[in-house]
Image (cartoon, rainbow, N blue to C red):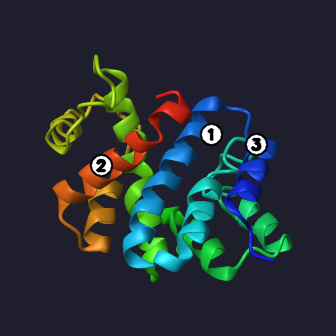
């Protein structure tokens, strides 16, 4: 039986205690849902599951030797399908797993950007309410702001998706903003 978003959330909550990490995974899932509705409308739940679980092992296994390999092995033991597991492996550039499917490309393209968008919202008086792509692009140029976010990965993700940069950023802002109240953003 395929993993549902509810089952994925339950698994995430079993493995992750950090509220910030949970919110990150929810934001990535929201961005994934937005792309799935366009690219694979019948597969939205699978894309959401991928977003919800891409970092579920990170808190317990943060090293490059373990994340996301430990989590993916656990997902395999639960019968989670190969496309989801491969996409999760591929979101870690160092895994050596190529991103070949639309799902895998989207996960990589939204992961770092979702975290960056949340960081941008946190320093704005209105948060996500009036955040626009141009503001995010301006902050991306400030290497000191959210310095842990890989600008290289964001650009590489956009190139891999072959999407317009501004449209991609705005899509992710809108997807996260739609979930902002539920996520306490």
The answer to whether the residue labelled 3 contacts the one labelled 2, judged by CB atoms less than 8 Å apart, is: no
Percent across and percent down for residue 56 are 68, 50
Name the disc covering residue 151, or none.
2
Q: How many neighbours does mark 2 have within 10 angstroms: few (below 14), some (14-19), or many (20 or more)?
A: some
> Is 59 located above or below residue 72 in the figure?
above
Horizontal side of residue 179 vs 16, given as left or right: left
Query: Could you give the CA–CA distance between mark 3 and mark 1, rounded to whole angstroms?
Result: 8 Å
What whole-number distance in Å separates the C-alpha atoms at marks 2 and 1? 22 Å
Callout 3: helix, strand or loop?
helix
**Which residue is located at x 65 percent, y 72 percent?**
85
Name the residue located 56 percent from the left edge and 58 percent from the top edge.
51
Residue 65 horizontal/vertical position (percent): 67, 58
Q: Specify the quadrant that holds the N terminus.
A: bottom right
Q: Nearer the viewer, residue 46 or 61?
A: 46
Secondary structure of the residue carrying numbered label 2: helix
Q: List the residue tagged with mark 1.
A: 22
């Amino acid at each position: 039986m395929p993993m549902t978003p509810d089952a994925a959330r339950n698994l995430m909550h079993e493995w992750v205690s950090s509220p910030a990490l949970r919110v990150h995974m929810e934001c990535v899932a929201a961005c994934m849902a937005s792309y799935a509705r366009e690219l694979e409308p019948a597969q939205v739940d699978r894309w959401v599951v991928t977003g919800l679980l891409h970092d579920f092992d990170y808190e317990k296994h943060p090293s490059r030797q373990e994340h996301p390999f430990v989590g993916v092995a656990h997902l395999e033991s639960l019968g989670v399908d190969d496309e989801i597991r491969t996409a999760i492996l591929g979101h870690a550039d160092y895994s050596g797993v190529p991103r070949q499917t639309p799902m895998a490309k989207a996960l990589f393209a939204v992961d770092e950007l979702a975290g960056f968008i949340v960081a941008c919202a946190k320093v704005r008086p209105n948060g996500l309410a009036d955040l626009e792509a141009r503001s995010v692009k301006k902050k991306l140029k400030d290497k000191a702001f959210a310095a842990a976010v890989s600008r290289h990965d964001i650009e590489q993700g956009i190139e891999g998706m072959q999407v317009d940069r501004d449209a991609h950023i705005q899509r992710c802002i809108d997807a996260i903003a739609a979930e902002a109240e539920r996520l306490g953003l």
